[in-house]
Image (cartoon, grey):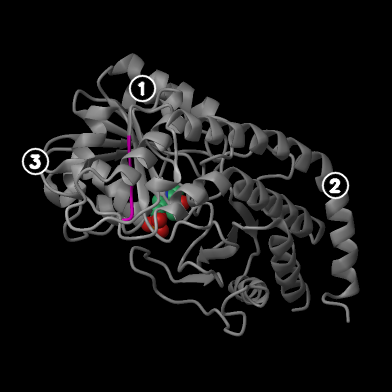
Amino acid sequence: MALFPANITALQVKALDQALPLFAALDVISEQNTASVLKAFRDQQVSEYLFRTTTGYGYGDSGRERLEAVWAELCGAEKALVRTQFVSGTHALACVLFGLLRPGDELLAVTGAPYDTMQTVIGHTVQTPGSLTECGIRYREMPMSEAGVDIGAIAGHISPNTRVALIQRSRGYSLRKPLSIEAIRTVCAEIKKYKQDCICFVDNCYGEFVEVAEPTSVGADIMAGSLIKNPGGGLAPAGGYIAGKAALVDMAARRLTAPGLGGELGATLADIRLFYQGLFLAPHVVNQALKGAIFAGLIFDLLGYKTLPRPEELRSDIIQAIELGSPEKMIAFCQGLQQYSPVDAHVRPVPGTVPGYTDQVIMAGGTFIQGSSIELSADGPLRPPYIVYVQGGLTFEHALLGILGAASAVAGM
Ligand SMILES: *Cc1c(COP(=O)(O)O)cnc(C)c1O
């Protein structure tokens, strides 16, 4: 029995043919990143005895400390926190902002409107109780065009009070391009030219292992991200990370725990082997997810939809945006993809409200780990021009089947 309609199967053949040279380029990157992971594991002498849980305060937790040393080395950073005590990427990012900023300080977003959940942390659009704005921190935003950061405008936006510059690597829920590692290098250098002590902070969500370097090795002072995205490799059951200059990471750690405690405490309650093993797998899993993203772009391009990035474009995050043009098509896309999930394939996703997001959101993702978006998932806020964002896929085979399911549903409307 044919899984998909004949016209979709014909597109599959065409798309795979166009994808082959692009896939070869991705394999070069994942091989290099795997070599870097193996080097960090070797340098830090990762051993089986580290794979144990700890209890209570978690003082001298060698499994945790070694994992953080591995991640710091991989990021070219002085220090890292890799913790399940971060409930999400947003929480890790918020710990950095609340850890670094004081009343009267200014936060400057140089990459336009931040990711939806960061807007509630900042509290500049909607007054959120407990937000940075409520704590007396001022916020400024530089608009960002589809072309990239307006480098020339940075000088005019930096004031003596600009303590932190927020640089979001990924496109998030927008059509602007992600920042390449080279672009991050340029932006950080430009900021430092006008204010040497302005902290360059990168929201690195969805960017890890897409290129062969991370932001903290090209000029960013600190960065944060989620462990149920790229660096968890699909195995990390929860958590987030922060990496960067030691003094800054310590300030964020005091927010995670308490002043005086910092990063010295925090028991490893989850099986820490999953974090090591997930990190080991992450370069390959990101490779599979990127192949899925390229394949999705090619299929929907052939179906006549606007897709971003273009198939051959340099990528710096794992997201593929597809402009579907109607809420009905977004729903069909997500329902089609959900049918090819390993978990909850029998349920039909519908739009709903999600904490941290202002618009209604639809999400497809029958994932082993709740909300994991390194596993194949598709989502988007229901607002014009009705763009669905597809990301993840632990195996390319799964990404391919899910995307063909989505394409069949949209094309069959
Ligand atoms: C995922 C993401 C976050 C954090 O989201 P969580 O769901 O809290 O992990 C922040 N910024 C960007 C760009 C993201 O993609």
* Real-space Cα separation, disc 1 to disc 2, in angstroms: 40 Å
Question: In the image, is the residue at mark 1 within 8 Å of ligand 1 by its beta carbon?
Answer: no
* Real-space Cα separation, disc 3 to disc 2, in angstroms: 56 Å
At label 2, the amino acid type is Gln
Query: 126 or 286, which is in the foreground?
Result: 286
At label 3, the amino acid type is Gly
* Observer able to see residue 127: yes
Q: Residues within 10 Å of mark 3 (few under 14, many from 20)?
A: few
Give the structural element (helix, strand or loop) at label 2: helix
Q: Mark 3 — residue?
A: 260
Question: Which x, y percent locates residue 190?
Answer: 40, 19
* Real-space Cα separation, disc 3 to disc 1, in angstroms: 31 Å
Q: Is residue 206 above or below residue 116?
A: above
Q: Mark 2 — residue?
A: 18
Looking at the image, tell me whether mark 3 or mark 2 is earlier in sequence order.
Answer: 2
In magenta stretch: residue 83: yes
Quick check: marks 1 and 2 in contact, CB under 8 Å?
no
